[in-house]
Image (cartoon, rainbow, N blue to C red):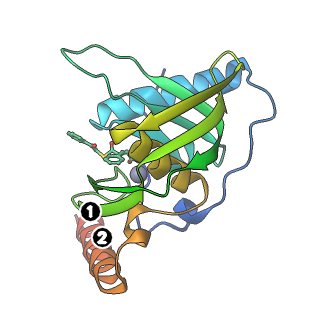
Amino acid sequence: MTVRPILTAPDPRLQAVSTDVEAVTDEIRALVDDMADSMYAADGIGLAAIQIGVPKRVLVIDLDQKEGQRNPVAYINPKILWASEETAVFEEGCLSVPEIWDDVERPARIKAEYLDRDGNKQVLEADGLLATCLQHEMDHLNGVLFIDHLSRLKRSMAVKKLTKAKKLAAAG
Ligand code: K1U
Ligand code: ZN
């Protein structure tokens, strides 16, 4: 298992639309394990494969990290079957959008289907942080970042800050 570098915005690879996994093979399970390692190394609660440069529809989420316990859950080819009209606002962050946090409004509850790491179809109903995190990660699969949900002004301020941080990092 390997910790892989996480792409940060602005990077055109983060705008890619990821493609469905055709079969849940050992190669996909190895990808899931690398994603989990990369997520934990970066102190995240979720990660989409595109964030490590792999344009496949694979997510890992672990909302249950306490006292060093790890319970990563893989969501492969996730699809939203239903979303509530009721919305909820959460302050979101993103490992690909470092040091920027802002409120995002999304459906409060969703019903989704996905394949688990054994390739079995699962259906889940989620609310609270899991609903938000699943929607945030599924956005990544369609090339969308949480800052794309902000006002044009806030988004352009965020992009400027990220571009400046990258330039400073490149200058050493
Ligand atoms: O980069 C990502 O997509 C993962 C992202 C998930 C997320 C967080 C909050 C709301 C919606 C989606 C993160 O994990 S950001 C890091 C984070 O949540 C965190 C980091 C340190 C301490 C506590 C939380
Ligand atoms: Zn993210």
Distance from mark 1 CB to nearest ligand 1 atom below 8 Å = no
Is residue 22 rendered to the left or right of residue 75?
A: right
x 44%, y 54%: residue:
7
x 48%, y 49%: residue:
135
Front-most of residues 19 and 53 = 19
Q: Which amino acid does label 1 sit on?
A: Asp
The quadrant where ligand 1 appears is top left
Which residue is under mark 2? 162
Is residue 103 rendered to the left or right of residue 143?
A: left
Distance from mark 2 CB to nearest ligand 2 atom below 8 Å = no
Considering only vertical position in the picture, is 126 above or below 11? above
Q: Position of residue 150 (x, y in %)?
A: 35, 73
SS assignment at label 2: helix
Q: Where is residue 161 in the image (x, y as percent from the top left)?
A: 25, 75
Q: Where is residue 50 in the image (x, y as percent from the top left)?
A: 56, 49
x 51%, y 23%: residue:
33
SS assignment at label 1: strand
Q: Can residue 59 be seen in this view?
A: yes
- Gap in Å between the C-alphas at discs 2 and 1? 18 Å
Which residue is under mark 1? 103
Q: What residue type is labelled 2?
A: Leu
Considering only vertical position in the picture, is 109 above or below 157? above
